[in-house]
Amino acid sequence: MESFVLILQILLCGFVCSISSAKDIITATDFLTDGKTITSSDGSFEMGFFSPASFTNNWYVGIWYKHDVPDKSVVWVANRENPFNNTSGVMLKIIDTGQLALLTPANTIMWSTNSSRPLAVKNTVAQLLNSGNLVIRDANDTKPEKFLWQSFDYPTDTLLPGMKMGKNFVTGQEFYLSSWKNEYDPAPGEYTYHCDPTGYPQDVMRKGKVKVYSTGPWNGLRWSGVPGLTKNTIYTFKLDLDEKRAFYSFALLGSVMTKLTMNNNGVLQRSMWAENRQEWHVYISSPEDTCDNYGTCGSYGSCNNILTPVCNCLDKFVPKDPRNWAMTNWSGGCIRRKPLNCQNGDGFLKYSGIKLPDTQYSWFDRSMTLHECKHACLRNCSCLAYSNLDIRNGGSGCLLWCGDLIDIRELPGGQDIYIRVATSELGSKKTKLLVLSLLLLIGVTVTGLTIGLYIWKKKKKRKMNLKDDLDLPLFTLSTLTKASSNFSVENKIGEGGFGSVYKGILEGGHEVAIKRLSKSSSQGVNEFKNEVICIAKLQHRNLVKLIGCCIAGGEKMLVYEYMCNRSLDLFIFDEKRSLLLNWPKRFGIINGIARGLLYLHQDSRLRIIHRDLKASNILLDADMNPKISDFGIARSVVGNETGANTHHVVGTHGYMSPEYVVHGVFSVKSDVFSFGVLVLEIISGRRNRGFARESHSINLLGHVWKLYKEGRPLELIDGHLMDSRYISELLRLIHVALLCVQQCPEDRPDMPTVILMLTNDAILPQAKEPGFFTESKVTSECSISMCSTNEITVTQLEPR
């Protein structure tokens, strides 16, 4: 018996030792051949021979994520320009010179590591590190600064955590990404991605030698033109800039796997590995829209993707070629309305909320103030604009542009720039004094009239005129009447608290949804105005698009894109239709809603709090992509504000957060609460409002909490979603939803954090008891004058 135990211990020890000593080294005698690989010590990365496709005879040596089977997400290729078509006898080994080389059976070198450092090391090895970096080093020295060569210095199409992009000014070596030629050929393709230090650093994508995308310059926090690149819990990013180097890099904060890839189709993608789904999830792509294309509007043209047309000249500038500009050929750009006259003095106009232009022809100084920057630019006739170099802590440093300004776009959270214009464009002091005098005289004259006008307005029904306020197409009443067959019952597709919605077909066959306000609704005018002002300035793939409006003949109508699958509630709460939404589709809907909210809360120009997020306000297109609708009671906040207070609570019972119902305090965390409720409804197929169980008197939130505490959350899941492949992901989303509906808003995550929780497997914090645990709690804290007791939104409107 003792001998048996001893043998077992020896076998166990051998097994453990074999695991702990997983092969990650290549030497002169222990080399790679076809069918053999080396693996990083933590099992993250694998290196060996691979062929991009079964129908090719081209073979390469590469590094890939070991877990990503069978697709092999290759992140680095050694011999990308020199494939071999027969693996028989091919070896990857350390040769006499201390280099790692790929040898043919005849000992011909097909590829090798050419080091700029002297290889006066007798005992060199190649090692695959846990970072995915292949290094050549002395077998007895593991210090990174002593590495003789490393693959991170020779990137292919993928930037991994710890890698760098940029330039070493001492050696002249540049580190950049280059796409594959196509998905089956890793040879360098047309597209490259650089951290370009020419002028002041910016990331630039090129097709050949032509710029096709630019991030804008570094502003101390992020790239100027990438507002979505914000501080998060997954990774950090930075720009290292001094007289010796300019390097951009990112580093992980946890165990999540993420990468940045330059695709062969000219799209840069940041991806994260979703363990539950066993796939890479793309969550940032660039370029993303028309305005991301480099120089879309030419010099001094500003691009805004929510306007039609997208290009407009900056204020005080006019099209250089008006004829071509009118034909949407904007490449010629714009010129100053009045030419500069440097000798007689010019001035500067401030332009706000923009992506800073291309910095190829720029100059910078980190120590100067903005005031000093202005005078430095004013003294140099070649200087055409200036701005702060760093936007942190109120702004610091100086950035000057010495060439025409190109690649400007309007962005939420954009920056300020001061552009040189003729003094006459600024107005003289005498002119300003005259204007002020006239304004004072007019003000005194009009004061009495204002009081009378106010009284008259209180007696008259409020009228609206949006023509002067919005660049929005206005439809005639006859056009919409004809499109909807005189608003026939057959074309009616929905009805809410402020009127009905009809399907319409415009001339040309374009389908639209027409929201017709009820004439009897005294609140409908404000509702209409609020929705138009709000949504007309928003554009995102997960927000319903407002096409135009109509204010004629006493009618007030909004014209939206038509969503053929109508609203989400018609599917998830219907026994038959719910079968059409499997879990991957529901997860896509949840993710799309989250992205729409992230845009509203963080990336939109207005920073919107929706206040009425619910299943009936999520519309679905033909591909079941979700779009948030109904912005009638949304509120915008300014600057860095994330919430406000109101005496008039608006919203729908079952979706409103406790602090909003009880105290009138609403914030982005109010929308997060509604999102959490919506996620639980999507997973369970049951409404929060009106949910009941014979065994207890709690609502859906309370029911979920009870199951969660008792370790029975699987009982919540809609029956036909019970697929073993998705169980862990479903359980995770239940946990995320519970975090969103916690009683205290401070405990709830914000939407950037929610999206990261949805797309990675990091450890989630413990959830606390949700708000509105029982129906009785809701009733006692929310009177009928404050909110709705059904699915129709009831509001008491207030000024924006």
Image (cartoon, rainbow, N blue to C red):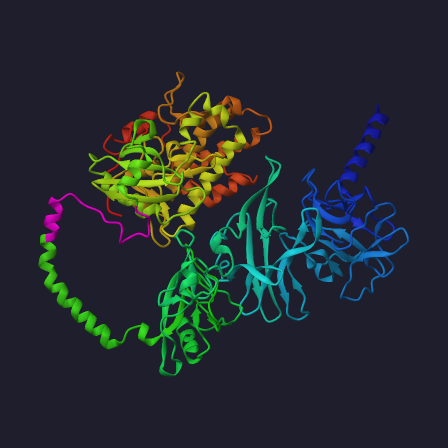
Q: Residue at x 21, y 36 (%)?
A: 519
- Relative height, residue 135 to residue 558 (above, below): below
Residue 469 colored magenta? yes
Q: Is residue 194 magenta?
A: no
Residue at the outermost right position: 106
Residue lying farthest to the bottom in this orientation = 343
Q: Which quarter of the rendering shows the N terminus? A: top right
On the image, the x and y values in percent for residue 305 come to 43, 52
Residue 709 seen in the figure? no
- Asked whether the viewer can see residue 342, the reply is yes
**In the figure, is residue 183 to the left or right of 658?**
right
Query: Where residue 104 sits: x, y (%)?
Result: 87, 52
- Count of marks overlaid on the render: 0
**Magenta stretch, overall SS:** loop
Q: Is residue 651 above or below residue 443?
A: above
Q: Is 43 rendered above or below residue 363? A: above
Residue 88: percent from left, percent from top: 86, 45
Residue 166 position (above or below residue 287): below
Position of residue 126 in the picture relative to residue 581 (left or right): right
Magenta segment range? 453-474
Q: Residue at x 77, y 66 (%)?
A: 117
Q: In percent of the image, x 47 and y 25: which residue is there?
A: 578
Residue 300 position by quadrant: bottom left
Q: Left or right of 183: which side holds 771?
A: left
Q: Is 132 on the left or on the right of 393, as rendered?
A: right
Instruction: Give the residue furthest to the top.
Output: 694
Quadrant of residue 56 in the image?
A: top right
The picture places residue 168, in percent across and down from the top left corner, at 65, 67
